């Protein structure tokens, strides 16, 4: 490691540390001679991309006051220097052994020194000091230690640089980054999102400080939809079959809701099973639902040409709370064959479709007419079902009422003292017509004569 180049004053000797372990040291102790200038330098050290170099020195220094008859030139310090070079070109005479071209880092002083008693047992009190220098830009450098009148041992020198380690944090990978040229430098490092993650908001960065520690995180990456963060956020793993995750984020995948499933890993939603559906407004975490069963126990109460219908809710709502009811009105009989939808004149109170309560009042029906009412149960997914809504029906017959007027009358024949007439049945007989009342007048008189004619 070391090459002594300026005189024979530095020598390699053996000694003991404070724990009585054998150590090899470089030692110098020419305290009785004035004007000492003893140098020892290291071999060529490659920079390896570092901009700031740290040097840890372990050494011991003899207490000048413990040396009898020592002159005033005795020192308890030494100097640390460095010299940059693109290649290992140093010789015993070059660069010159002086400050400039060598660059002084600092004067190093001991926190503890040893005395004659310590020296007798060759036990040395070891000091540790760390210094740094930079920026450095050449391919490498040398270190040199200058003694100028001390009694000391150089035990160990550790040369290192600081770097921030390769790390995965905030969902991104940051490669190993060397610290900056100054102890206060912050070196920005751009992160790369881990697989199946994506950046949120701003580009993700970390800063490497002079101590080789990451700090000042900016931005982050989050797992994409269909992936969850595992292993302390260092991995974005696809959701397993039967689970899903609909949005970007670090939260865990969720199990598929009831009546749904996934067809592959990494699902962002779960598909409803056959016969089950989901509306556009239903959250993806909500179970898939189906259509309701038919209403139960429809009761009718007829009053002349109106009817009140009441019923019980379906036994099965399909798993939803938005069940409403529709009323289908059909008029049956009347000589027209089969049943037909009721006309627009029929009134429903409060309304015909989308009833939230289990009752409806229907009016303006035809008298003495058979009706069939279907009470349908529907919910938010009924329109997605290929089948018609399930319903319960009830048949009623309205009460009889007076028939409508005869609209058309024809003269069939006439004699001197008789006339034969014909007419059609009223459009709305409103029951069984038993008789017709015929009224006629003599010309130019106001009196009339009535006759009942059996139907």
Image: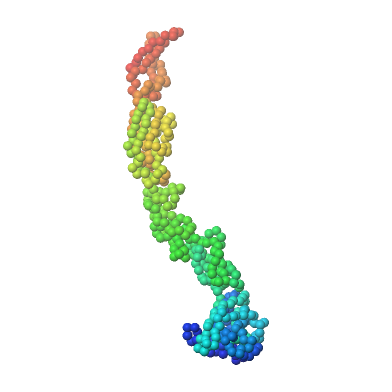
- The residue positioned 50% from the left and 63% from the top of the image is 170
Quarter occupied by the N terminus: bottom right
**Residue 124 versus residue 54: which sits nearer the camera?**
124
Left of 295 or right of it: where is 443?
A: right
Q: Is residue 416 visible?
A: yes
Residue furthest bottom in the image: 8
Q: Position of residue 169 (x, y in %)?
A: 50, 65
Q: Is residue 326 visible?
A: no
Q: Position of residue 365 (x, y in %)?
A: 39, 28
- The residue positioned 53% from the left and 82% from the top of the image is 126
- The residue positioned 39% from the left and 53% from the top of the image is 257
- The residue positioned 39% from the left and 48% from the top of the image is 289
Residue 334: quarter of image: top left
Relative vertical location of residue 403 with respect to residue 237 in this rendering, above or below = above
**Residue 12 versus residue 95: which sits nearer the camera?**
12
Residue 416: quarter of image: top left
**Residue 86 versus residue 276: which sits nearer the camera?**
86
Q: Position of residue 320 (x, y in %)?
A: 39, 45
Count of numbered tags: 0
């Amino acid at each position: 490691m070391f090459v002594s180049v300026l005189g024979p004053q530095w020598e390699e000797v053996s000694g003991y540390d404070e724990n009585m372990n054998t150590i090899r040291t470089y030692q110098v102790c020419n305290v009785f001679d004035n004007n000492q200038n003893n140098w020892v330098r290291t071999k060529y050290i490659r920079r390896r991309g570092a901009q700031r170099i740290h040097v840890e020195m372990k050494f011991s220094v003899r207490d000048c006051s413990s040396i009898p008859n020592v002159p005033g030139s005795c020192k308890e310090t030494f100097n640390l220097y460095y010299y940059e070079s693109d290649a290992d070109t140093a010789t015993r005479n070059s660069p010159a052994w002086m400050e400039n071209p060598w660059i002084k880092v600092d004067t190093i002083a001991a926190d503890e020194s040893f005395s004659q008693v310590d020296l007798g047992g060759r036990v040395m009190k070891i000091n540790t000091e760390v210094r740094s220098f930079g920026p450095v830009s050449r391919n490498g450098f040398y270190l040199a230690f200058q003694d100028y009148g001390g009694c000391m041992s150089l035990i160990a020198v550790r040369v290192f640089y600081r770097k921030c380690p390769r790390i995965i944090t905030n969902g991104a990978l940051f490669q190993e980054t060397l610290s900056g040229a100054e102890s206060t430098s912050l070196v920005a490092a751009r992160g790369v999102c881990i697989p199946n993650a994506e950046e949120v908001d701003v580009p993700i960065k970390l800063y490497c400080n002079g101590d080789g520690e990451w700090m000042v995180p900016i931005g982050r990456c989050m797992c994409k939809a269909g992936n969850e963060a595992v292993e302390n956020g260092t991995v974005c793993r696809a959701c397993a079959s039967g689970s899903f995750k609909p949005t970007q984020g670090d939260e865990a995948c969720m199990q598929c809701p009831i009546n749904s499933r996934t067809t592959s890993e990494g699902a962002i939603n779960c598909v409803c099973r056959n016969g089950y559906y989901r509306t556009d407004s239903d959250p993806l975490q909500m179970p898939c639902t189906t259509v309701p069963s038919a209403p139960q126990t429809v009761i009718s109460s007829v009053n002349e040409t109106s009817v009140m219908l009441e019923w019980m809710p379906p036994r099965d709502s399909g798993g939803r709370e938005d069940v409403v009811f529709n009323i289908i009105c059909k008029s049956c009989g009347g000589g027209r064959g089969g049943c037909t939808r009721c006309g627009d004149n029929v009134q429903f109170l409060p309304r015909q479709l989308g009833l939230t309560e289990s009752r409806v009042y229907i009016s303006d029906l035809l008298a003495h007419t058979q009706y069939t009412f279907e009470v349908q149960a529907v919910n938010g997914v009924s329109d997605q079902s290929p089948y018609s809504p399930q319903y319960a029906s009830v048949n009623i017959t309205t009460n009889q009422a007076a028939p409508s007027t005869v609209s058309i009358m024809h003269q069939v024949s006439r004699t001197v003292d008789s006339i034969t007439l014909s007419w059609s049945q009223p459009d709305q007989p409103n029951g069984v017509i038993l008789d017709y009342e015929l009224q006629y007048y003599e010309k130019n008189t106001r009196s009339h004569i009535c006759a009942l004619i059996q139907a």
